[in-house]
Image (cartoon, rainbow, N blue to C red):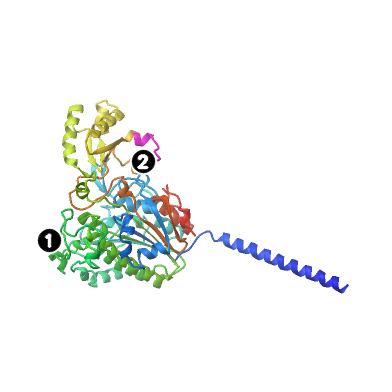
C-alpha cells in the first residue's frame, strides 16, 4: 500500500513538473513572438557620395580593422546592390535611400531640372521662401519642399510623436536636407567660399544653436587648411594609376596633378574654404561636426530611437576632379576609413556597443575617365550636347518649321511645347516618335524612349526599367536618350562623372551593422529603395508613404 502511494505521488509530481515546464516553454515562445521590433537607441545612416562598390575590394588590404572592415565582418554586406533608376546623381540618390522609392514617385528627378509650368530651372533643395541661418549669403535658402513623399526619418518622427530626434549633416545642402525629410529637428551643411562654417535654413530654426556657433568659432575648421599628402607611402598605392597623368584636373596654381597638394588657397588660413571640399579634409570636418551633434544633441541617450543622417561629400568632389583611378581617390577612401572608425568608437562610448544600428551606402557610382578608357582601347568617349543641339535644331526647322516645338533639353531629356503641338494640330505621340528616331541617328546615342512608352508600359528589366523608375509623369521630359556605354554627356576629359543607367553608376555598397542586424552577406540583387523598408521593419514603424522597395529579409535578426 505504501509503495502504491509513493508511486502515485511520484507520478503526480512528474506530471506537475512536466506541466510547469510546458507552461514555461509556451511563455518563452510567447515572449519571443512579442518582440516584433528592435529599439536601438540611435540609427546612423551614412551615405558616401560617389562610392563605387569596388572601392571596398580594391582598397581592402589598406583598410584598418575599425572602419569598413568592422562594418562588414561584424555586420551584413549586400554585394549586388544597385540603383534601379536613372539619373544616378546626388539629389535623387539621397532622396531614394530615405524614401524607399524612386524619382518616379518621390519627384526628385535630378539635382536640377527644367520646371515645365514656370519655364525655369528648379534646384532639388532650393526654396526661396526660406532664409539662410548662420550666413548672410543665399546658401541657406533650402528646404525639402520639392520632395513629394515622406522619408524613414519622417516616419520615425511620426511614430514617436516627435520624441525621436532627427539630425542631418553633410557638406552639400541636398545631402542633409533630403535625408532629414520634412520633419527633421535640424539639417546642417557646410558653406565654403570665404566663410568656412556650418549653416542651416529658416525651415528648421530661427537661429543656430549655441553649440553650432561655438563649433564654427572654435578654429577647428581652419586647422584643415593645410597641405594634402598621402596617408601612407604613395609607392604602396598600387591599386590606383600613376600620380602624374593627363586624365586628372589640378588645383589653382598647380602645374601637375600630383602630391603633395599645397596650393596657396589650401595654405591660407583666412579665405577660400571651398577647396576643402575637394580634399579628404572635407569628410573629416563632416565627421567632426557629426560627432559634435551626437554629443550636444544628446542623441541615443534614452529608449526612444533617434536618427543621425551623415553624408560624406568630399569623395564626389575628388572623383570629379581626379577620377576613380587616381591616387587622390585611393587616399580619400583610406582616410574616410579612419573617420568611420572614429564615428564607430564614439558610438560605442556614447550610445553603447550593441545599442545602435548603422547602414552605409552611396548615392551613385562613377565611370572611369572615358579618355583613359579610350586610350586603353576600351570603347568610350564623350557625347557633345552642344554639337548635338546644332544638328537637332536643323532637323526641327526642316521638319516643323521652327525650333520652338522644343522648350528644353537637359538631363538627357527633351521637353516639348505641347501648346505649339496642339496649335499645329499634330499628334503628340507622332512628334515624340519622330524626334526619338532622329536622336537615335546620333552616333553616340545608344537608345531612345518616348514619354508615350514610359506612360503606357510596365517595364521589369533592362534599361527601360531603370529609366521608367526615374521618369516622373509630371516633372520629366517627353523623350529620353541614353548615351553609349563608356560615354558621358558634355563633360571635360579629366575626372570622372556619373548619372547614367549603366552598371558602373548603379552598383554601390550596402552595409548594415549593429542592433537588430544579422552577420552575413548576400550576392542576391538588392536595390536602393529596399533600404528604408528594411530599417522600417527593424524599428517596427510605418514605411515611408511612397515606398516601392521591399525589406531585405536576410539582413534582419
Q: 10 Å neighbourhood of mark 1: few (<14), some, or many (≥20)?
A: few
Task: Decide: is 162 above or below 479.
Answer: below
Image height check: is 130 above or below 388?
Answer: below
Residue under the image location 44 percent in, 55 percent down: 534
Report helix, strand or loop for mark 2.
Answer: helix
* Residue named by callout 1: 254
The reply to whether discs 1 and 2 touch (Cβ–Cβ < 8 Å) is no
Residue 419 image-quadrant placement: top left
Q: Residue pushed farthest bottom?
A: 2
Q: In this rendering, does residue 9 appear at all?
A: yes
193 relative to 97, above or below: below
Asked whether residue 145 is drawn in magenta, I would say: no
Which range of residues does the magenta coloring cover? 453-461
Give the residue at the far top of this rendering: 425
Density class for disc 2 (Cα within 10 Å; few <14, some 14-19, many ≥20) is: few
Relative to 132, 102 lies left or right: right
Number of marks in the image? 2
Circle 1: element type:
loop
Residue 297, visible in the rendered structure: no
The residue singled out by tag 2 in the image is 462
Where does the image place residue 281, in percent across and percent down from the top left? 24, 65
Amino acid at each position: 500500500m505504501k509503495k502504491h502511494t509513493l508511486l502515485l505521488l511520484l507520478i503526480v509530481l512528474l506530471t506537475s513538473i512536466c506541466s510547469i515546464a510546458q507552461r514555461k516553454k509556451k511563455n518563452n515562445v510567447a515572449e519571443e513572438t512579442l518582440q516584433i521590433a528592435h529599439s536601438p537607441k540611435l540609427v546612423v545612416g551614412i551615405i558616401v557620395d560617389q562610392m563605387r562598390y569596388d572601392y571596398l575590394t580594391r582598397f581592402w588590404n589598406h583598410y584598418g580593422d575599425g572602419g569598413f572592415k568592422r562594418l562588414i565582418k561584424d555586420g551584413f554586406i549586400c554585394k549586388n546592390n544597385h540603383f534601379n533608376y536613372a539619373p544616378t546623381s546626388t539629389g535623387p540618390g539621397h532622396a531614394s535611400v530615405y524614401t524607399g522609392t524612386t524619382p518616379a514617385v518621390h519627384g526628385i528627378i535630378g539635382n536640377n531640372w527644367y520646371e515645365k509650368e514656370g519655364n525655369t530651372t528648379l534646384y532639388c533643395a532650393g526654396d526661396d521662401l526660406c532664409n539662410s541661418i548662420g550666413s548672410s549669403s543665399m546658401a541657406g535658402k533650402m528646404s525639402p519642399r520639392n520632395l513629394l513623399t515622406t522619408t524613414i526619418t519622417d516616419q520615425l518622427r511620426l511614430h514617436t510623436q516627435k520624441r525621436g530626434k532627427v539630425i542631418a549633416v553633410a557638406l552639400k545642402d541636398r545631402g542633409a536636407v533630403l535625408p532629414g525629410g520634412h520633419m527633421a529637428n535640424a539639417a546642417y551643411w557646410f558653406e565654403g567660399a570665404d566663410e568656412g562654417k556650418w549653416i542651416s535654413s529658416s525651415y528648421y530654426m530661427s537661429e543656430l544653436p549655441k553649440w553650432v556657433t561655438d563649433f564654427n568659432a572654435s578654429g577647428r575648421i581652419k586647422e584643415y587648411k593645410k597641405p594634402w599628402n598621402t596617408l601612407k607611402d604613395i609607392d604602396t598605392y598600387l591599386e590606383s594609376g600613376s600620380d602624374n597623368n593627363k586624365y586628372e584636373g589640378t588645383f589653382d596654381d598647380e602645374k601637375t596633378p600630383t602630391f603633395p597638394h599645397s596650393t596657396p588657397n589650401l595654405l591660407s588660413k583666412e579665405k577660400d574654404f571651398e577647396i576643402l571640399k575637394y580634399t579628404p579634409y572635407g569628410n573629416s570636418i563632416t565627421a567632426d561636426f557629426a560627432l559634435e551633434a551626437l554629443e550636444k544633441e544628446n542623441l541615443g541617450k534614452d529608449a526612444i530611437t533617434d536618427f543621425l543622417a551623415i553624408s560624406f561629400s568630399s569623395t564626389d568632389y575628388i572623383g570629379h576632379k581626379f577620377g576613380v583611378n587616381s591616387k587622390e581617390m585611393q587616399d580619400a577612401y583610406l582616410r574616410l576609413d579612419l573617420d568611420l572608425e572614429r564615428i564607430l568608437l564614439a558610438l560605442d562610448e556614447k550610445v553603447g556597443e550593441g545599442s545602435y544600428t548603422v547602414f552605409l551606402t552611396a548615392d551613385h557610382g562613377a565611370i572611369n575617365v572615358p579618355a583613359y578608357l579610350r586610350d586603353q582601347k576600351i570603347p568610350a568617349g564623350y557625347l557633345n550636347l552642344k554639337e548635338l543641339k546644332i544638328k537637332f535644331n536643323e532637323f526641327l526647322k526642316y521638319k516643323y518649321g521652327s525650333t520652338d516645338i522644343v522648350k528644353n533639353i537637359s538631363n538627357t531629356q527633351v521637353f516639348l511645347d505641347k501648346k505649339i503641338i496642339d496649335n499645329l494640330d499634330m499628334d503628340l505621340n507622332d512628334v515624340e516618335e519622330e524626334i526619338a528616331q532622329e536622336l537615335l541617328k546620333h552616333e553616340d546615342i545608344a537608345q531612345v524612349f518616348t514619354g508615350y512608352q514610359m506612360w503606357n508600359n510596365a517595364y521589369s528589366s533592362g534599361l527601360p526599367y531603370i529609366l521608367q523608375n526615374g521618369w516622373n509623369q509630371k516633372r520629366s521630359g517627353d523623350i529620353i536618350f541614353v548615351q553609349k556605354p563608356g560615354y558621358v554627356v558634355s563633360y571635360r576629359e579629366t575626372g570622372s562623372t556619373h548619372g547614367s543607367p549603366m552598371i558602373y553608376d548603379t552598383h554601390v555598397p550596402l552595409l548594415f551593422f549593429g542592433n537588430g542586424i544579422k552577420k552575413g552577406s548576400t550576392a542576391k540583387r538588392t536595390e536602393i529603395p529596399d533600404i528604408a523598408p528594411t530599417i522600417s521593419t527593424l524599428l517596427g514603424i510605418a514605411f515611408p508613404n511612397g515606398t516601392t522597395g521591399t525589406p531585405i529579409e536576410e539582413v534582419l535578426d
